[in-house]
Image (cartoon, helix red, strand yellow):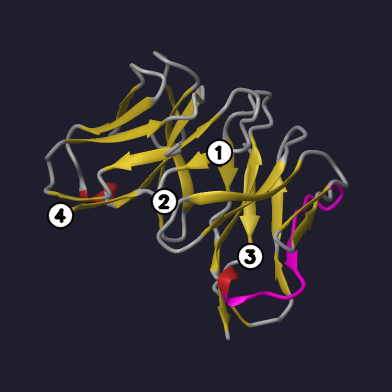
Amino acid sequence: NAGVTQTPKFRVLKTGQSMTLLCAQDMNHEYMYWYRQDPGMGLRLIHYSVGEGTTAKGEVPDGYNVSRLKKQNFLLGLESAAPSQTSVYFCASTPTGRGYEQYFGPGTRLTVT
Amino acid sequence: GDSVTQMEGPVTLSEEAFLTINCTYTATGYPSLFWYVQYPGEGLQLLLKATKADDKGSNKGFEATYRKETTSFHLEKGSVQVSDSAVYFCALTDSGGSNYKLTFGKGTLLTVNP
């Protein structure tokens, strides 16, 4: 049981490049989330999903897109990366009815130059 | 909207010292309250929770009591260890009824020296 995994762990992009971050969970959780963590800002919710095929905007969705084609995977895309998107990105998941107990992945450190 | 305010860090203590990290919240309904911990290089883990007023959450020697009258959920530990060095986040649920979104405070970095 791997829990929540994230790929890649580190990435450096040039401004304007695109990339996709992959989050996978093997706990059969319904809900999944993408956060970004910046110094002094805590965690901010980017997008979330309450089930396969559904997504919704969080607090800071601009510049990101997501997809949840399979229950176990939640993809975060950056179509045209900007330096302001330099951050550590965390994925989390939670089972139905226990929305408070979110299980986090180890994070992806992204630098946009 | 809902919000969480934590004391700013960093907090530096010696081993066996008493720890308090203050947390207050603003919410329109009756949220559940949580403390998450992030050890260096890792994701967040749930440390403890309280789901209604006057509940006390506890885990690994840490405690926090849900105080509705003061809208607070302060984290305490009687004797900290070097292994407690981490970032601590106070959080609450979305009180709009969905119960699946968390609002986090900005985090408090704790360093415990031997």
Secondary structure of the residue carrying tag 2 is: strand
Q: Amino acid at mark 1?
A: Gln
Q: Amino acid at mark 3?
A: Met
Of residues B70 and B32, the one nearer the viewer is B32
Q: Is residue B103 magenta?
A: no
Predominant SS along the magenta part: loop
Of residues B103 and B50, the one nearer the viewer is B50
Near mark 1 (Cα within 10 A), the count class, few <14, some 14-19 or many ≥20, is many
What residue is shown with label 4?
Answer: A113
For mark 4, name the chain: A
- Which numbered circle lies on residue A37? 2
Q: Nearer the viewer, mark 2 or mark 1?
A: 1
Residue A44 screen position, x and y as percent: 46, 44
Disc on the earlier residue, 2 or 4: 2
Q: Amino acid at mark 4?
A: Thr
What residue is shown with label 1?
Answer: A102
Separation of disc 4 and disc 3 at Cα? 33 Å
Are the residues under marks 2 and 4 on the same chain? yes
What residue is shown with label 3?
Answer: B7
Q: Which of the 4 image quarters holds residue A21?
A: top left
Separation of disc 3 and disc 1 at Cα? 23 Å
Separation of disc 2 and disc 4 at Cα? 18 Å
**Residue plotted at (35% across, 34% down):** A23
Disc on the earlier residue, 2 or 1: 2
Left or right: B17, with A72 as reference point: right
